[in-house]
Each structure stands twice: as structure tokens, then as C-alpha cells.
Amino acid sequence: MSEPAAETTGPGFWETVRAELLDGDQVDLVLRLTALLAMANAVKPFAPKIVVALMMGATLFSRTLLRSRGWWLMVTFFVVSTTSMRWYTADNHKWLWGYWLFACAIAAGERGDVARRVLAFNGRWLMGLCMLAATIWKIVGWQYFDGSFFVYTLHFDSRFAIVTQQLGQPGHAYQDARQAFGRVASSLQPQSVTHTQAMLAFALFACYWTIFIEALWSLAFCSTRPRWLHDKRDLVALVFIATTYFLAPVHGFGSLLVVMGLAQCPVDKWRTRLGYLAALVMLHVAYPWTQTVWRIDPGALGNLIGE
Amino acid sequence: MPLAAYLAPVVLVVVAISHQVLTRVTPLTPWKGGGFGMFARTDASASRVLIALGRTADGKRLRIELDRPLVTPTDSRKLRALPLRGGLELIARSCLHHEMVRDGNVLRVPDPRKPQQGRRLIRLVSVTVQVYARALDIEAQQLSLEPIGPEVTLER
């Protein structure tokens, strides 16, 4: 009798995930994630969104299209044209999508390590430069140094309603401010808007924190000096994503930053790469839920919790 | 790496610098135009308001409700993002061209589908169009309007 064959066990679930997501073809992973996210985020108007969704959907299922430079250039041209024609509604990240899709087109036509280096180079520099431009804008805009930008945001951006209420703003004062926003335009007369000291203090903190983290981000990505900061650039990016998009519902921008972060992250840093993937899940699963809560009318929430 | 691999960051820098220049020489909002100026200042398109004031033959100066057919929502959005003289003049001309009815303190183009029941049709003598941005003075705790870009006045 022959001995029974030794029981062989295949790789476990996490080993498979790791192998597929982290040890597999990194260029394919980044291109596929880009295609997946571009379907929902690259353009805003409905009709072009459908076209991009179909093109990127086809890219997900065809490796020929995935590695076709001409195909990616077509998508890039379509996205950039749409954004340019609708410049008056296009958010910052729609432009960034155009740049990134072009980088993907160049990478898709290359083979081996060159493709990976094209994505890594563009990921790092696009991340660094867009945040550098954002930091410069916040400095020259001159509304961050006295906190007035965030005081305004706390008053008039409904996404921050809960924060505003937590900072001691009574419900009637919040509603008055919202009405003043409309009334100032209809009456053309100045309107009184009151805020608490806590709102002012929070606004100052939020303003300086934002400038600090964005400046740190741009320095970490654009410069290799100081070395320790450049080496920790992924940590800076993940802290920024975790803190910013918890409140700001612009996960389209956050997702693109995550994909570019993944593209520029060295292959051997598998924990960091996993961090980026976790951030992506967080942006699409956890944060939309919290943002739904943020958007609840504070008056309605007050009634709900019996205040 | 191929030379084209360097193109995207270069274009980003060129667009960002152009955007900085454009916002200084034109009333373009920092939020639009690809310069990454979102969340930098409060004068986003949504905070801006397009206002037209009409003067009637009896000297009254009233606000004009800017809706179709005077201006389309798309043109209104464009003008709030970048209020240029040409676009504002088109609206002023359109206001002068249409007969209006008074509705409280507002003038508007009558809806042809609804009977106006003896309302007097008004032809404007002059129209002033301007974009304003809401501005918050945190010391005075006061919200007011600040003019953005050119003020256009046309007379009949």
C-alpha cells in the first residue's frame, strides 16, 4: 500500500489577497484601480459620465485595453475635453484626473519596470504639486490666518452643521445665519451673523492645521530633503486623508490621491500599500455614512435626541 | 522613461501658474480653473450672486429676477465664476429688451402661460448688472456683499 499523499493546503485568504493586491503586477493593479474609480469620479455631467463608465468598464475586463496607450489617450482626451468645456463647474480633482489618466496612458504603453517607474514618478509629483498649489492658494488667499475661512464655512456649509452645533452655536443662531445667507442677496443689506468663541477657536485651529499638513505634504513629496520627511511621505498622506475626508465629502479627490499614493509607494512597503487600500475602502464605505449624519438638519437631529 | 512621462506634472505647473495670474488680472474665482484654489477663499461661485437692478421711467430702482429668458442657469454659473463685461452686457441688453411686471419689490419677465390680470407692463430705462460675493467680517460679525468684477450699466 502506498502512503497517503501529504495533505496540501492552498494559500490562505489573506495570503491570496496579499499576493493579488500587493505582490502581483503593480502596474495592472494601479491601472485597474484607476479605471474603476474613473468610472464614478473622472467627470461630473451625466452623459459624459456614462461614456467614461463604459470605456473604463471595458478596460477592467480587457487586458488588451488595459495596456493600450491609444485607448487610455482616448479616455484622457474625452475627460480633459469635458472638464475644459465645463470649467465653470469642474472641481480641482477633475483636472487632476486628466493629468493622471495621461500618465496612465504613457505607462500603459510601456513594459516591465519602465511602466511602474512612469506611474511612480507621476504619482509622486502630481500629489506633491497639487498640494503645493493648494498651500500657496491658502497662503495668498489670506483668509486662513485669522480663521475667517472656516468661520464662514462653519456658518454656511451644511456639511459642517453638526460641528457648528457641537461648538456651542445655538440652533436658532445657526438657522439665522443660514437665512442671512439668502437675505443678504435679496435685500442687498448687510446681515448680522453671530458666532461663538469656540467656533472662532476651532476655525483658527482648522485653518493652521490645514496649512501645516498641506505644506508638510507638498514638501514631503516634492523634495527628497529632509530625507526622514520624504521617507515618511506616505504617513503624511494617510494622516491627511484620514482627517480631511472624514469631514469633507469630496471622496472623488481622496480616491485619486489614494491611487496615486499607491502608484508611487515602493513595492517592498507592503504595509503602507495596504494602508492606502484601507484608506480607499474607508473613503467609500465608512465616510459616506458619517457624512450622511453630518448632513442631517441639526434641528431635526435635536428633536431626534430629545434636546 | 519616455519624455512624455514628464508632461503631466509640467502641464499641472503651467496651468496652476496661469490660474494664479488669471485670478489676478480677471475676477475668476479661485475655486474654478484648475489651479487647486478650492477651499482657499470664501468667494466660490456658490457664494457669488448675480444681481441686476432696473430703473423704471418713474425713477424707481428695483431688483430684476434673473431667470429664463433673461439668462440661462449655465450662463449664470459661468458669470458667477468669471464675471466678464461682455457677458454682463448681454444680460443688461436682454433686460432692456424684455417688458417686465412688478412683483412686490422685484421685476420679472411675465410668464406667457399665466394670465397677468391687468398688471402693467414695464419697460426699463436703464439696467445695472454686477456680480457680488458674500463676505463675512468676523470682527463685526456681519455678512455683506462685495462687488466682484465690472459693473455694467446700459441705458435705453
Image (spheres, coloured by chain):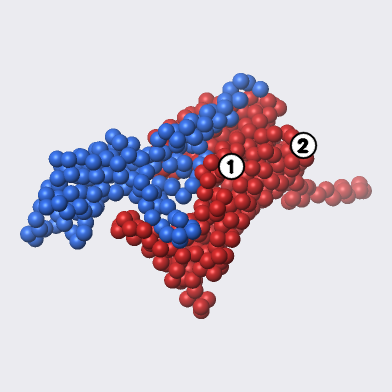
Rendered location of residue A201, percent (x, y): 59, 61
Chain B visual colour: blue
Viewer can see residue A293: no
What residue sits 14% from the left and 45% below the top? B125
Which residue is the site of mark 1? A135
Q: Which mark is residue A227?
A: 2
Distance from the alpha carbon under mark 1 to that under mark 2 = 21 Å
Task: Judge by depth and name the residue closer to the eye, A49 or A254.
Answer: A254
Chain A visual colour: red
Rendered location of residue A85, percent (x, y): 39, 35
Considering every residue shown, the one lying at the far front of the view is: B140
Task: Judge by depth and name the residue closer to the eye, A256 or B133.
Answer: B133
Quadrant of residue B82 within the rendered picture = top left
The answer to whether A30 appears left or right of B94 in the picture is: right
**Residue contact at pointers 1 and 2, CB within 8 angstroms:** no
What residue sits 20% from the left and 49% below the top? B54
Rendered location of residue A182, percent (x, y): 35, 59
Dot 2 surroundings within 10 Å: few (below 14), some, or many (20 or more)? few
Quadrant of residue A272 within the rendered picture = top right
Three-letter residue code for mark 1: Thr
A121 above or below A7? above
The answer to whether B68 appears left or right of A13 in the picture is: left
What residue sits 21% from the left and 56% below the top? B106
The answer to whether A307 appears left or right of B68 in the picture is: right
Which secondary structure lies at badge 1?
helix
Q: Which callout, 1 or 2, points at the residue further toward the start of the chain?
A: 1
Task: Judge by depth and name the residue closer to the eye, A295 or A207.
Answer: A207
Three-letter residue code for mark 2: Arg
What residue sits 43% from the left and 42% below the top? B29
Q: Numbered disc 2: what chain?
A: A
